[in-house]
Image (tube, rainbow, N blue to C red):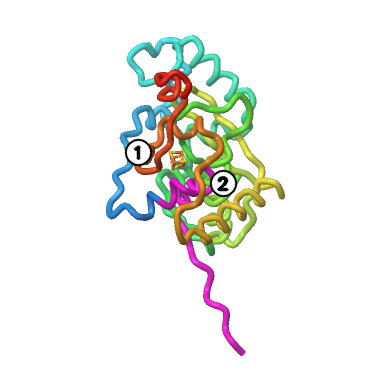
Amino acid sequence: MKRRPPPRVYAFTDIALAAYCPRKLYYRQREAEYEPPERAGFELAFQYPSLLDPETALDTEPIAVTPVVYRRNLGCSKARIGAFEALCDPTDRGVFLAGRRAWGIAHKVLKTPLAPSIVSVGEPPDTGVWESHAVRAVAAAKALAFERETSVERAFVEYATHGVIREIGLTARRVGQYRRALRTAASIDGPPPRTRNTDKCGSCEYRAQCGVRTRSLRSLLGGR
Ligand code: SF4
């Protein structure tokens, strides 16, 4: 009987890119070396108690909103997220996890509840989390569950420069998004079509080779 090849294993970041824009993943995979950009504000995710303290001046912190809005957002996150205290004092940070289908770094790992957290320095959506962040968080949760041989029911995404923390459950919908992104990553063998959501292209470092005209460029050309 012909044996099936073992399933390929992907980096959390590649699975997230597959969810964001498969074509971007295609370009990224072809780079000999990729230097991730500086993540100004990343450390804010490890300073919440001090950032909530009214004695702390936020003006010089690398936050993306006004100090008033930042503190309000963080206060709401504290009130809403049951694991807020655990996120302030995580059991581990920068943990390498290797699962059955995915590997990568969880920025925080909590013991109670057992859960990974992914820190982003980007802007949060109005509600929930961006799909690429959800996919990355689910990939980390699945890898954590695999390593600890137990179930992991939730994960967190922290939008550190906005003071916004969101919790996601490993629901059938979220796991479905993760599996779809895995299949997408596995199926890339040539340049996939461009994303239809051109809002994603404005900040994409592969714009030039991709040949995408962003909205601002189009408007500069008078909409032609
Ligand atoms: S420019 Fe747009 S379509 Fe092209 S790779 Fe980047 S995000 Fe994808």
Placement of 23 over or under 101, stated as above or below: above
Placement of 210 over or under 59, stated as above or below: below
Give the numbered dot on residue 70: none
Q: Looking at numbered disc 1 in the image, what kind of residue is underneath it?
A: Ala
Placement of 79 over or under 39, stated as above or below: above
Q: Secondary structure at mark 2?
A: helix
Disc 2 target residue: 135
Quarter of the figure with the N terminus = bottom right
Instruction: Determine crowd level at label 2: few under 14, some 14-19, many 20+ residues with C-alpha closer than 10 A.
Output: many
Counting residues from the start of the chain, the first of labels 1 and 2 encountered is 2
Q: Looking at numbered disc 2 in the image, what kind of residue is underneath it?
A: Val
Give the numbered dot on residue 208: 1
> Which residue is located at x 56 percent, y 38 percent?
196
Which residues make up the magenta segment?
1-26
Left or right: residue 214 versus residue 164 is: left
- Of all residues, the one furthest to the front in this rendering is 224
Q: Secondary structure at mark 1?
A: helix
From the top left corner, tell me how far across and down residue 165 is, in percent. Answer: 55, 29
